Amino acid sequence: MSKKHYFDPEDLKKFGNIGAWQKPMADKFFAWYGEVFKEGALTEREKALIALAVAHTVQCPYCIDAYTSGCLEKGADEEQMMEAVHVAAAIRAGSSLVFSTQMMNHAGDLTM
Amino acid sequence: MSIHQRTKSLAARHSDLSDTFFQLKVLNGRALNEARFPVFSEMIKPAGFADGKIKPTRVEIFQLNAGKLCNQTCAHCHVDAGPDRKAENMSRENFERCLDILRQYDIPTVDITGGAPEMNPNFRWFVSECHKLGKHVIDRCNLTIIVSNPKYRDLPQFFAENQVEITSSLPHYSARRTDSQRGDGVFDDSIEALQLLNAVGYGREGSGLKLNLVYNPTGTFLPGNQAALEADFKQQLQRKFGIQFNNLYAITNMPISRFLDYLIEHGQYETYMQSLLDAFNPGAVAGVMCRNTISVSWDGYLYDCDFNQMLDLKVAGAGTHLSEFDLAALENRDIVLNQHCYGCTAGAGSSCGGQVVE
């Protein structure tokens, strides 16, 4: 192992290098990725906010850095960015809590 | 509301960076850092400028910096303007020289900047004279000056009477983003000023009175797509404050003066320069503003742009002062280039009129 820690911020700059070991797939991925983030039915700012929220959900430090920068570049402010993270957090919390219906169902089966 | 100043001028702090030669040394990796980035004049050679030189197209904009005096001390100011800069303001004599030139030559646009140019005692007289000459006048207004003192409160009416186009800095429609760069209280005062401008017709459809906003990043990142930012600003300013405006110009922060100081203080200088280089757009070179602009300093010297002015890089190959203004020589000069020029060629390019390519 070349390093004694995970998640070196410098590694984000090497993302493009993944093509070195599988170029056709990497080319397709980056072309698709670029297309995804272009303005469409959603604005670039809205897409950057979604990406920031997802980055928090998947807890990817590279993605959090990249889309904090991306959101600011696209004109989002702190309030919008924090609201986006709350949306992600609310879905995470809700997705746990909604399973409590299964717990309640099963407990109902087991108890008098 | 009064403004809480964000910082002090480099001059007031007696910073090494108040010396323009020292700034150039930093930009060329000979002071405070050893980073050597590719030389700008080399970088443009494959972009259709094979000899590494940029020539003017035609002088269409006479941009005049009325002085460094300002009621604000913004964190990124490339002029190092502020309330303490009382000495550096254009004299009546130099304004007269400008008028003589504007009478003599067919230069259609007069673009007045500062500082807060409205604080120069000759400002209103000069604007009126330009208007009488049939020139199109642009005032780069910081907005807050309009509500800073009762004597400036009638500026919107004055602007309207002289058909002045207003181009105003508002880095964000959020108070936090704006005040973090321009000083606490600036956002609220800017909103009030925009409402006063709207009230006399500025930014309103059919009025013929143009009101533009200038967006620049409130940090060490580059501006996003200008059209998308404009759409967001229009929607949010209308929704929150009922404010309307015409165009939004997205401008890149130049790594000079107080923004250079900010970059160095925060350890971001090399990262920022690299981001400008990474975003270098050969297609933006042909549209840089120095090709159709002459920039005049408060003391009457001539420059390729306001940024060269702040680095004291005077025009080359022509007389350098208003008193020796020679349009033919100026239109044949080589524009003075240095490493800060990467700021105008990053991404979609950057100029006083916003991005330079679609």
Image (tube, helix red, strand yellow):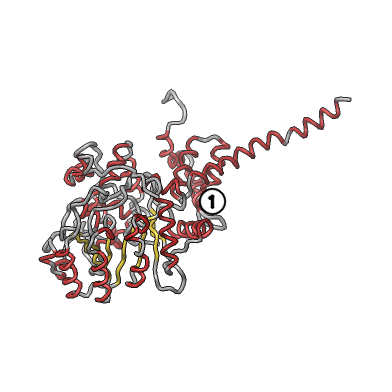
Q: In the image, is B312 to the left or to the right of B149?
A: left
Question: Residue, x 45% and y 25% (percent of image)?
Answer: A5
Q: Judging from the image, what secondary structure is the residue with disc 1 in? A: helix
* Position of B324 relative to B83 (above/below): below
> Which residue occupies the foreground of this view, B58 or B186?
B186
Foreground pick, B310 / A66? B310
How far from the left and from the top, in percent, is residue B338?
A: 22, 51
**Along the viewing direction, whichever of A74 and B192 lies nearer the viewer:** B192
How far from the left and from the top, in percent, is residue B8? 28, 42
Q: What residue is pinned by disc 1?
A: A46
Residue at horizontal 29 percent and vertical 38 percent from the top: B264
Q: Does the rendering let one see residue B51?
A: no
Tell me the quarter of the picture where residue A111 sits.
top right
Looking at the image, how many numbered discs can be counted on the residues?
1
Q: How packed is label 1: few (under 14 Cα within 10 Å), some, or many (20 or more)?
A: some
The single residue placed furthest to the front in the displayed view is B150
Task: Assign the N terminus of chain A to one quadrant of the image.
Answer: top left
Q: Name the side, left or right, on which B326 lies relative to B288.
A: left
**In the rendered view, does B316 fall on the left or right side of B267?**
left
The residue shown at (31%, 66%) is: B138
**Vertical side of A65 occupied by B142: above or below:** below
* Image coordinates for residue B209, horizontal then vertical, percent: 39, 70
Residue B187 visible to an observer of this rendering: yes
Q: Amino acid at mark 1?
A: Glu
Q: Quadrant of residue B154?
A: bottom left
Q: Is residue B164 above or below residue B299?
A: below
Q: Is residue B192 left or right of residue B41?
A: right
> On what subunit does the disc labeled 1 rest?
A
Percent of width and height locating residue B352: 32, 60
